[in-house]
Image (cartoon, rainbow, N blue to C red):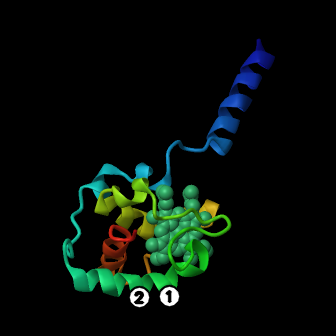
Amino acid sequence: MKIVLIGFWLSFLSLIVCGEPKGSLVQRAPAKFVQLANPYQGNEAAVLAGSKLFSRECAACHGKDAHGIGKAPPLVTPDVRHAPPGALFWVLRNGSLHRGMPSFAHLPEPQRWQIVSYLENIR
Ligand code: HEC
């Protein structure tokens, strides 16, 4: 009985340690962020500013046209384009540290929203 219990706990623990959450990163954003509105919605200057920030901060991993390189996924996907702005904002704030996506919480908030504006407008 004890052995069965220990086995049960071990498999439970390994699930916690190794279990990967399902869905792409943007789909895992908490509701609190998903509902945030982009203050630059529809602002073309913000898209342009975001594209410059993208070249500086993101292109090394995601490619200069956001088509992805190596481990960094492409960002020209329906998942990203149709993601709620707040979900993208959350990805930039938190990153996905154990999978190689850094946090950009050090960038001022307006700059992060500009990057979100750019992400929603890349083709
Ligand atoms: C050091 C490399 C690196 C840099 C720099 C980087 N990323 Fe990422 N990014 C990744 C990796 C790796 C993933 C995949 C993480 C995962 O699946 O958990 C990712 C995932 C993402 C996702 C989620 C994509 C999806 O389909 O869910 C978005 C959005 C994203 N990055 C945007 C950006 C933006 C915008 C920047 C610049 C501000 C940036 N990244 C900079 C490596 C990077």
Question: Residue 56 has which mark?
Answer: 1
Q: Is residue 16 above or below residue 109?
A: above
Q: Nearer the viewer, residue 12 or 104?
A: 104
Q: Amino acid at mark 2?
A: Lys
Q: Nearer the viewer, residue 113 or 120?
A: 120
Q: Is residue 83 above or below residue 119?
A: above
How packed mark 2 is, by other alpha carbons closer than 10 Å (few <14, some 14-19, many 20 or more), is some
Could you tell me which quadrant the N terminus lies in? Answer: top right
Where residue 37 sits in the image (x, y, percent)?
A: 21, 64
Q: Secondary structure at mark 1?
A: helix
Q: Nearer the viewer, residue 16 or 49?
A: 49
Q: Is residue 30 above or below residue 123?
A: above
Q: Is residue 95 visible?
A: no
Is the Cβ of the residue at disc 1 closer than 8 Å to that at disc 2? yes
Where residue 62 sits in the image (x, y, percent)?
A: 56, 72
Question: Residue 52 has which mark?
Answer: 2
Where residue 86 sits in the image (x, y, percent)?
A: 30, 61
Q: Quadrant of residue 71?
A: bottom right
Q: Is residue 32 above or below residue 57?
A: above
Distance of label 1 from label 2 (alpha carbons) = 6 Å
Could you tell me which quadrant the C terminus lies in? Answer: bottom left
Q: Is residue 28 left or right of residue 118?
A: right
Tell me the residue at 36%/51% (across/down): 30
Q: Secondary structure at mark 2?
A: helix
Q: Amino acid at mark 1?
A: Arg
Q: Is residue 79 left or right of residue 8?
A: left
Where residue 24 sits in the image (x, y, percent)?
A: 50, 51
